[in-house]
Amino acid sequence: MTELRAISDAWLENKHGEEKGFSLGAFEEEYIANFDVAVLRDPSGKITAFANLFKGANLHELSLDLMRYRPDGPGFAMDALFAELMLWGAAEGYHWFSLGAAPFSGIESRQLAPIWNRIGGFVFEHGEHFYNFEGLRSFKEKFSPEWTPNYLACPGGLAAPQILYEVNVLISGGFRGLGN
């Protein structure tokens, strides 16, 4: 746990961010201790990346929550960890491996699309200050996933921006975490 904490702290410092929460894993020892944790080690045995696992019932789906890697480790660490987890999951009999969401990606933002689609497309393309939407999609795309849409149901009109803002505050752990 001490080594995982050191990796997580270094990762957060390198990202100039703060711990998130709610729908994203946060490094809390009591939380991490409730799950199996996959680790990737270098040849000397030092952990270079880790993720906690969510094992679905009846071997239906394997997914992960908190993912961290050593900033000074190899650039392919997360790719290798994901690939090994997929192979392990298949060998264990899991039917699916979930890479999670890629927020705002895949939204049609063409000129004649509905206004909220164009806004979502704009956020995906230009929202790097708040989150690396395109980088996340690009990372996951290399595994050839089957993308399925997620929807947020909310009242019409101008309620959507307020709701999205409040969801972001919730995920970011409060106002201080926004933009990190």
Image (cartoon, rainbow, N blue to C red):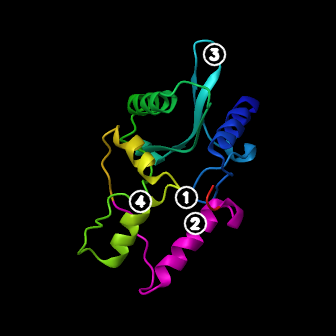
Label whose residue precedes the other's in the sequence (4 or 1): 4
Label whose residue precedes the other's in the sequence (1 or 3): 3
Residue type at mark 3 is Gly
Q: Position of residue 153 (x, y in %)?
A: 43, 76
* Residue that badge 4 annotates: 124
Numbered range of the magenta stretch: 149-177
Residue 168 is tagged as: 2
* Residue that badge 3 annotates: 45
Taking the view exactly as shown, the residue that stands out farthest to the left is: 112
Residue 130 is tagged as: 1
Q: Residue at the location (28% across, 65% down)? A: 108
Q: CA distance from mark 1 to mark 3?
A: 35 Å
2 and 4 marks in contact (CB < 8 Å): no
Q: Residue at the location (64% across, 57% down)? A: 21
- When asked about the image quadrant of residue 84, the answer is top left
Q: Position of residue 111 (x, y in %)?
A: 25, 72
